[in-house]
Image (cartoon, coloured by chain):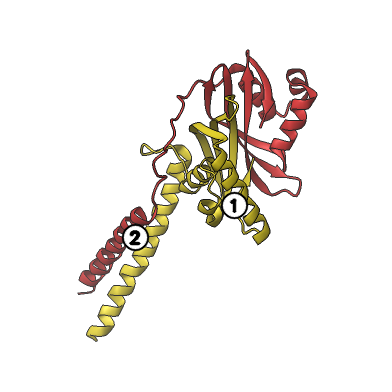
Chain colours: A red, B yellow
Amino acid sequence: MSEVRAYGTLALFVLGLAIGAVAHQFTDRGPGDNPYPSLPRTDEPAAARDVVQAIANDDPQSLSKMLSSDILTDLGTALDPIVDVRSTKFVGAVESEGRLLSAYIITGKTSDGNDFVVGFVLRVANDQVVGVN
Amino acid sequence: MVSRFRAASLATVVVGALLGFLIASAVGLVAQDNGLFGGNGESPVARAYMLGLLQRNPSAISSIRPQQGIARRAAELQGAATSRSASSIQPLSLTYLGGASLGQVQVHIYAVGLRSSSGVDQFFPLALTIAGGKVVRSE
């Protein structure tokens, strides 16, 4: 009798799990239709990859040779408030009329030691990083 | 005795349903970050915000960003109305580049193509930070 009851309870619990999962599908709607055209993705530009590699390696010397002072200032702003980069992730790149945008997600620590995440985009033209957003 | 049995059964189903909902949410978040199950990881909140911006419709995004003072909201509506009537900006493309989450914070990045009233095409990125279902940073 107690075995039957245990199986019954387990079955009800599994039924509940299924109901919860189905309910989530109804409440968690994905993004609607995009009324504007999307541009095709391109590969990560080498110039941007080198810059992000230097960031990931905490290599300011390489970074100083690759970017102008203005772009370094913009990069600092884009990374704010992260001061200690822990991971970098390339998420996608698109190109329009020779202008490339290469997007990254950076996770790291703030000066207070808190975990933080930021996103930034490197602008690439003529195989060079020409801007940061 | 029967009512007690029913209550216990109902409680078991409810607890299971809550847990099922939480597990589905967690799995959904991981899938969103990694673009699994055919999705690209785009957040509905981020998409709604971008469409509101491109369509110059501050009312559409008022519920998904931090609360602002009435004067600022009025100024935005005024600016949007002027912008719409002048047809100064024509959206050309909206491309979701990708995103990630860390705890309650999500970052989503878009590339936007616009044509200004003078016919000049602009192509620029926008990174949105979402926390608590609201866009808290846009740059």
Q: Return the x and y of residue A29 as percentages of the image width and height.
A: 38, 50
The disc labelled 2 sits on which kind of residue?
Answer: Gly
Q: Nearer the viewer, mark 1 or mark 2?
A: 1
From the image, which quarter does the N terminus of chain B lie in? bottom left
Q: Residue furthest top?
A: A126
Q: Residue furthest bottom?
A: B1
Q: Chain of mark 2?
A: A
Q: Is residue A35 above or below residue A19?
A: above
Q: Return the x and y of residue A95 as percentages of the image width and height.
A: 53, 21
Q: Residue furthest front?
A: B85
Tag 1 secondary structure: helix
Nearer to the camera, B114 or B135: B114
Left of B135 or right of it: where is A41? left
Can the viewer see residue B69 in this picture?
no
From the image, which quarter does the C terminus of chain B lie in? top right
Q: Is residue A115 above or below residue B126?
A: below
The residue depicted at 46 percent of the width and 41 percent of the height is B42
Tag 2 secondary structure: helix
Crowding at label 1, few (<14), some or many (≥20) Cα neighbours within 10 Å? some
Can the viewer see residue B138 in this picture?
yes
The residue depicted at 51 percent of the width and 42 percent of the height is B55
Q: Which residue is mark 1?
A: B77
Q: Is residue A98 above or below residue A24?
A: above
Left of B135 or right of it: where is A110? right
Q: Return the x and y of residue B47 as percentages of the image width and height.
A: 48, 43
Left of B62 or right of it: where is A11? left
Q: Chain of mark 1?
A: B
The quadrant in which residue A78 appears is: top right
Disc marking residue A20: 2
